[in-house]
Image: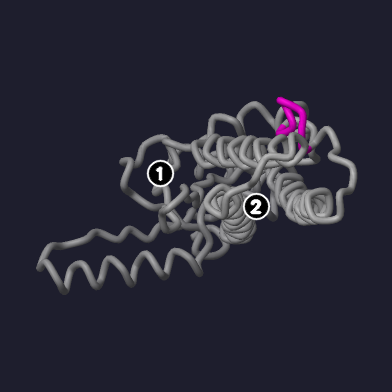
Amino acid sequence: PAYIYLSFYTRTTNATPKRYFMTSRQTNQLTDQQIEDVINTLDAADVSHRDWLRNFHAALICNNELTPDITHELAHTLCSFGRWYYNYAPAILKQQQAFLDLEHLHAVMHTSGRQLALKFAQHKPISPEDYHAFMETQQVFSGTMKSLRDHMYERLYSYDKLTGLMMRGPFIHILESETERENRTGEESCLVLMDIDHFKQINDNYGHLAGDRVLINLARYLRKHVRLYDSICRYGGEE
């Protein structure tokens, strides 16, 4: 299957969103289908956590039942996101720092909620500071999850599915940034445009599947031999 490379957004409490800039050699690989599955899971988790938050408030305000996904010591493993992350998420995903951060935020949020729920069950007062701290963890977790989902969606459609190389649109942004850097610093950049000789003959004589294999192997060769800070794009066709 075609592979694409991912870098992620994350944020921590009392901080603005932080972006991890990672080169293709520093990141792990996920298939397009795995990425789509993760996006769908994050969408579902966003909905389910809003339901969880409503149930949490209903328990404290309306004296509804405190369910195990609120009061259990391992409550963060019982919600839909927790069940997916700890039981079904690809192992390669857990090597991404952004998902490690998201898992930590998720556990902190559930721990904070559990502490408030136990105070309520023991008829102890809940201070405004404790409640606001809990709501902040919920908001940070929700915001981080949405940012990560949106960024993965963006990356999914910014890379060529056949070769895994960047497509023309995002590459143009890199060229614009390099031009601005040249104008600002006076330093030089190097741009190489290459195509495959007689590529049409390969397709005509051996079929388009053979041509695809040529493109895939050339892309693999280029990724292996460029420097960490170089960028590669499939500009169009065999260019």
* SS type, badge 2: loop
Q: Is residue 164 above or below residue 86?
A: below
Residue at the left extreme?
186
Q: What count of labels does the image hold? A: 2
Residue at left 31%, top 41%? 227
Q: What's the magenta region? A: 70-76
Q: Compare residues 225 and 133 and report the one nearer the observer.
A: 133
**Is 239 in front, or is 28?**
28
Position of 150 with respect to 221 (left or right) is: right
Q: Is residue 107 left or right of residue 96?
A: right
Provide the residue designation for mark 1.
Answer: 23
At a point 74% along the width and 39% down the height, the residue shown is 123
The residue beneath circle 2 is 161
Picture coordinates of residue 47, whole percent (x, y) = 79, 56
Disc ID at residue 155 = none
Q: Is residue 136 left or right of residue 120?
A: left
| Residue 169 falls within the magenta-colored stretch | no
Under mark 1, the amino acid is Thr
110 in relation to 63, above or below: above
> Can you give x and y, in whole percent of width and height, for residue 144 in the image?
57, 53
- The verdict on residue 72 being magenta is yes
If you read the primary sequence from the N terminus, does the residue marked by circle 2 or circle 1 appear first? 1
What residue occupies the far right of the structure in this picture? 65
Report helix, strand or loop for mark 1.
Answer: loop
Coloring applied to the structure? one colour
Report if residue 25 is visible in the image.
yes
Q: Which amino acid is tagged 2?
A: Lys
